Image (cartoon, coloured by chain):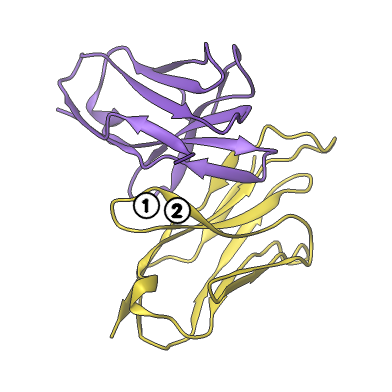
Amino acid sequence: NAGVTQTPKFRVLKTGQSMTLLCAQDMNHEYMYWYRQDPGMGLRLIHYSVGEGTTAKGEVPDGYNVSRLKKQNFLLGLESAAPSQTSVYFCASSLLRVRYTFGSGTRLTVV
Amino acid sequence: GNSVTQMEGPVTLSEEAFLTINCTYTATGYPSLFWYVQYPGEGLQLLLKATKADDKGSNKGFEATYRKETTSFHLEKGSVQVSDSAVYFCALSDQNAGGTSYGKLTFGQGTILTVHP
């Protein structure tokens, strides 16, 4: 099925470990986004990309890095995980900036 | 910057009751407005949207009207069902004065809706 696929779905990290979250879309969308969801705070934008090879900071970028080497993939990296990064992470892609498709999320716990 | 404020929840209703979830926004330019729904353990699904003032979005019995004069986009449903129990998010997409947009979404904090039989 066409859509946005996130891997992994769940992960537990120890403080200081690193990991990469993968987002893949097969809809040829130019725009891709990474959000984090925390209780009572809605979703907040971490980083976004307006096309292959481009990335930009969102509202809460500290502690994260991203790359968009291929149009269909948008990677979110945590170099040194902290407990404050415990969250649910959602990737989204956009067609024409009014139609968005979200992945099913990655639940990350940092202990 | 842009912001979205939703009524605080949680909201608990009986089946067939009338639902209103208030949403107001602050934005420059001409944002598009959205309601998303999130069922337990799932991602966000688009419920409805409106792209300009006075537009009414509707889907599955839910409605919301883009009111520029009151900067609001309240969600309503005349008769809720148990299956409507979920978290509802109001959101807007950014637009600068020149009309270009990177499509960044700004979300409200979400409203938990529980419908009892």
Q: Are marks 1 and 2 in contact (CB under 8 Å)?
A: yes
Nearer-the-camera pick, B64 or A61: B64
Query: Does residue A52 appear left or right of residue B97 in this picture?
Result: left
User: Residue A53: where, in percent of width, then height?
Assistant: 59, 11
Name the residue beneath numbered marker 2.
B109
User: Residue B93: where, in percent of width, then height?
Assistant: 65, 44
In the image, the chain rendered in purple is: A
Q: Look at the picture and state if A52 lies above or below B77.
A: above
In this orientation, does residue B114 appear?
A: yes
Nearer-the-camera pick, A103 or B56: A103
Q: Look at the picture and state if B4 lies above or below A23.
A: below
The chain under label 1 reads: A
The type of residue carrying mark 2 is Gln
Task: Tell me how far mark 1 sits from mark 2, CA to CA.
Answer: 5 Å
Q: Look at the picture and state if A29 lies above or below B52.
A: above
Task: Residue A40: give its label.
Answer: 1
The chain under label 2 reads: B
- Do marks 1 and 2 share a subunit? no
Residue at position x 33%, y 49% in the image:
A39
Query: Does residue B62 appear left or right of residue A91 in this picture?
Result: right
Task: Residue B68: give its label.
Answer: none
User: Residue A32: where, in percent of width, then height?
Assistant: 55, 29
In terms of secondary structure, where does tag 2 sit? loop
Name the quarter where the N terminus of chain A is drawn.
top left
Counting other residues with Cα less than 10 Å from the Cα at mark 1, is it few (<14), some (14-19), or many (20 or more)?
A: few
In the image, the chain rendered in yellow is: B
Residue at position x 47%, y 22% in the image:
A74
Residue at position x 18%, y 19% in the image:
A15
User: Which of the 4 quarters of the picture holds residue B96?
Assistant: top right
The type of residue carrying mark 1 is Gly
